[in-house]
Amino acid sequence: MEISELRALLTPEGLKALDELGPVDEVADVARIVSRLRAAGHSPELVSAAVGQARLRTKAKGKFGDFAARMLFTRAGLEQATRLGVAARHAQRMRRAGVTRVADLGCGIGGDSLAFAGAGLDVVAVDADEVTSAIAAYNLAPLGDSARVIHGTAEAHVPVEGDENQAIWMDPARRTAGHSETRRVSSDDYSPPLDWAFDVASRTSTGIKLGPGHDRDSLPVDAEAQWVSADGSVVELVLWTRALARDGIRRSALVIRGERSHELTAGADAVDEPVRELGAFLHEPDGAVIRARLIGDVARSLDAGMLDERIAYLTSDAAVTSPFVQSFRVRETMPANPKAISAVLKANDIGSLEIKKRGMDVDPAAFRKKLALRGEQTATLILTRVGDQRRAILADRVPTAG
């Protein structure tokens, strides 16, 4: 969105037109709506802004729920924004640490600040981009004096050190500048720069949000690193420092499913359990557990071992599961070739099949087309390597614990 479009949108006429559009998703809907708005006499800037925002609001519902219907977005800002439920948990951590004020340096569209202020924290939200900071101000306006937005750089608005009730939140921009078509950049080009962010965090209680695949070797050794997954997807890595880092914890996997959450913590990476033969159960660790390198701790809780030392599957004979894994009851194994698999599927009357793979260069959709699926039953097929062999494991999902 350009500044001219934002100015056209932030008028009574523009906001009314946007609110009246409701959800907009399909391309056919967009063409019809644009024609209707232009015929009603609206300017090209207002039409472009309103339709663009309506589409972004529709897409944003997955992150912001019903709040999305009254928010404004940029495409890049929405992509990087923290899910509201995850941000609320970050706010709870700050409150537990005694924090009452937060400086959100690089606030984007204001998603994190929305959660912080909603939890009763006083927020100063800063963004260097004029359009983005204006959108953040709009999104935070219902919170009144609890949230103040500043158009400026993170470097120029670092709070004074030494205030135990003050914390900093940073979500460095990981894409090129702009509001729509942007691309990811290397960590050397984050804004604000990571070296600067890490230096600030070493002196002031800080949370720094990074991509979940960030290079672990570059993380500060004195920070708590928390990988977060939401409904099966690893969505972020957060570094917590000083008062926001918990004593004795340097690795954490936070697993969120719906409204419930479970956390696994440790003082360091966990040692893996030895490899063992495939047992009665196969366990797939949550992605946050894998990123945090806490697979060994989960394995010990399940009396399980590694199926292969290079692949993140666990196996056991005990009929137990955990919130940190998806468990499968093994039916049988076979070579990972379509002919052998199809014979087993036919013998088990399997017509509906979930295909998972790890450690094999296979396209599950293309592989499915090679299989004979004509039965009445359902199952899961797991394609993986066990030592030097390519194996297929036919299994049934076990209900997730917790």
Image (cartoon, rainbow, N blue to C red):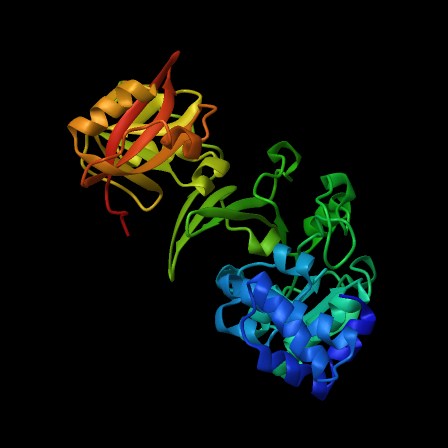
Q: Is residue 158 left or right of residue 89?
A: right
Q: Is residue 218 left or right of residue 92?
A: right
The residue sitting at 75% across, 73% down in the picture is 134
* Quarter of the figure with the N terminus: bottom right
In the picture, measured across the screen, residue 372 lies left or right of residue 346, that is: right
| Quarter holding residue 337 | top left
Q: Residue at x 70, y 48 (%)?
A: 174
Give me the residue at 68% from left, 77% from top. 138
In front here: 45 or 396? Answer: 45
Nearer to the camera, 359 or 141: 359
Residue 31 image position (x, y, % from top left): 64, 67
Q: Quadrant of residue 122?
A: bottom right
Q: Is residue 402 visible?
A: yes
Query: Is 373 above or below relative to 305?
Result: below
Residue 255, x across and y down, in percent: 41, 49
Image location of residue 343, percent across then percent down: 22, 22
How many marks can you see?
A: 0
Q: Is residue 239 above or below residue 17?
A: above
Residue at (66% x, 35% y) in the render: 218
Give residue 307's position: percent from left, percent from top: 33, 22
Q: Give the farthest residue toward the top.
A: 388
Residue 113 seen in this snapshot: no
